[in-house]
Each structure stands twice: as structure tokens, then as C-alpha cells.
Image (cartoon, grey):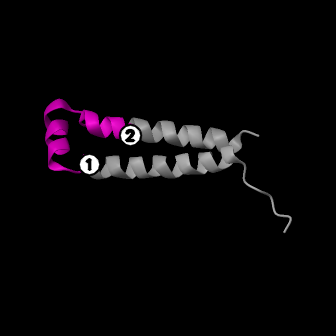
Amino acid sequence: MTGKQTSPKGLLGIVLLVAGAGLAFWGFQKSEGLQSQLSSTFTGSHSDNVMMLYIGAGVCIVAGVLLILKK
């Protein structure tokens, strides 16, 4: 087999992409909860926990893409 091997950086990039997608999904699920809806109603923004999940997801996704694209 002479297939192309995945580098450790590429594998880490894939793991970060999957983790980022999971965090984004988890954040979306929490944003639909009662506590987050009440917070959004009274303050006009999502709760801190939901925002941290979204920020973490964004960081993981960007880092994952950069690791995959970097040669």
C-alpha cells in the first residue's frame, strides 16, 4: 500500500474540527434551554455558558482548519 499517510498535525486538525462541531452543537442545544431563553429575554444576549461554548467551538474549528491546511 503506497497511500498517503496523515501527518500528526492533520490528525489533530481533524480532531479539533470534530470537537468544534460538537461544542457548537452543544451550545446550540443549551441556547434552546429555559435558562438561556430567560437570559436572552431579559438581557438581549445568550448566557455566558452558551457564549463560551460558541467561542470555544470557533477557536477549535479555526485551529483545526489551519492545522489541516498547513503543510
Q: Is 50 left, or right, of 60 in this rendering?
A: left
The image quarter containing residue 70 is: top right
User: Which of the two residues, 19 or 37, is positioned nearer the viewer here?
Assistant: 19
Place of residue 4 in the rendered image (x, y in percent of width and height, measured from the top left):
80, 58
Q: Is 17 left, or right, of 4 in this rendering?
A: left
Q: Is residue 47 magenta?
A: yes
Residue at image point 42% right, 52% down: 22
| Rendered position, 3 above or below 51 | below
Residue at image point 61% right, 43% down: 65
Q: Is residue 57 magenta?
A: no
Q: Quadrant of the C terminus?
A: top right
Which mark sits nearer the N-terminus, 2 or 1? Answer: 1
Residue denoted by label 2: 54
Report the amino acid beneath label 2.
Answer: Tyr
Place of residue 62 in the rendered image (x, y in percent of width and height, measured from the top left):
55, 38
Which element is circle 1 on?
A: helix
Q: Quadrant of the N terminus?
A: bottom right
Magenta highlight range: 31-54
Report the amino acid beneath label 1.
Answer: Lys
Residue at image point 65% right, 40% down: 67
What secondary structure do most residues of the magenta stretch adopt? helix
Which element is circle 2 on?
A: helix
Q: Is 2 left, or right, of 37 in this rendering?
A: right
- Which residue is at the far top? 43
Residue denoted by label 1: 30
User: Which of the two residues, 58 or 2, is positioned nearer the viewer here?
Assistant: 2
Crowding near the residue tagged with mark 1, few <14, some 14–19, many ≥20 C-alpha atoms within 10 Å: some
Place of residue 5 in the rendered image (x, y in percent of width and height, measured from the top left):
77, 56
